[in-house]
Amino acid sequence: MEYNCPNCNLAITANFCSSCGQKKYKRIDKKYLWDEIQYTVLHTNKGFLYSVKSIIKNPGKSARSFIDGNRVNHYKPISLAFVLSGISAFLSFKVVGLNTVLREVYASNKMDSGMMNDYMSFISSYSSIIMLLFIPLFAIFTKLSFRKWGHNYYEHTVMNAFGLSFYTIVSILLLYPVLYFARGNAILCAQISSLSILIVPLAMIWFYKGFYGERPLKSIIWRVLLVLLMVFVCYMVLVFAVVILLVLTKGPGTLKYLQPK
């Protein structure tokens, strides 16, 4: 039976109009509404669960496949990083209560540093959100470090989105359950949270080895260390700038709030 597109009136012989892309008419029913809910909430019918599964298996290979053009089954990487970071922040703040636990630790006797304990607890609790905001900057670092390996800045932005998604998935599946059961012991929670930073270099090495499978591991490790060095220098400059700004706006007396009591 011939069916004409309701948008441009041309005959549709497949599922979509070859002229305007309008989907072939289908009566609204239970399945239609369920597909719409999936599309609106998680876009699962276009790759959310597929991308998460692929990233868990091999994040670097998944990113390489996407950049090389195999994209039809994938959720958009920037959107994926946003969704996962939101889930991570919710679990950290509402379920684990990491922000409260760490503030309690930093406010204990020798670790109380006034304004600084709020700063450190915020950084630790919302690491995924913070890294999400800094993806464009991280892309500059990875582009510089891997500059001779053939990918442009925008491709590095996508790489970092995949990398952050992998880090966030690991946090959601492994780190947060451990922190949840350890939340009764604030000191232990803080130690686990601090040690979890070791996941980052290991995850980066695995990611880039999967992405650049043809490159030697030693070469990848050196480049990852260079990226981490640039991140560390940038972080120290940022902390210094914040301290200087506080001194300039609130006076030298502000420094006493940044020092341990």
Image: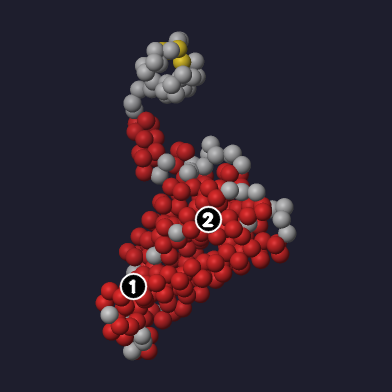
Q: Is residue 29 visible?
A: yes
Identify the residue under disc 2.
139
Q: Position of residue 101 (x, y in %)?
A: 35, 75
Q: Position of residue 70 (x, y in %)?
A: 59, 39
- Could you tell me which secondary element the residue under label 2 belongs to? helix
User: Looking at the image, which is closer to me, 5 or 3?
Assistant: 5
Q: Position of residue 161 (x, y in %)?
A: 50, 53
Identify the residue under disc 1.
245
The three-letter amino acid code for the residue at tag 2 is Ala
Distance of mark 1 from mark 2, alpha carbons?
27 Å
For the view shown, which residue lies furthest in the front direction?
A: 248
**Which image quadrant: the C terminus?**
bottom left
Q: Residue at the spot x=56%, y=48% of the render?
A: 155
Q: Residues within 10 Å of mark 1 (few under 14, many from 20)?
A: few
Relative to 9, residue 84 above or below: below
User: Looking at the image, which is closer to me, 105 or 67?
Assistant: 67
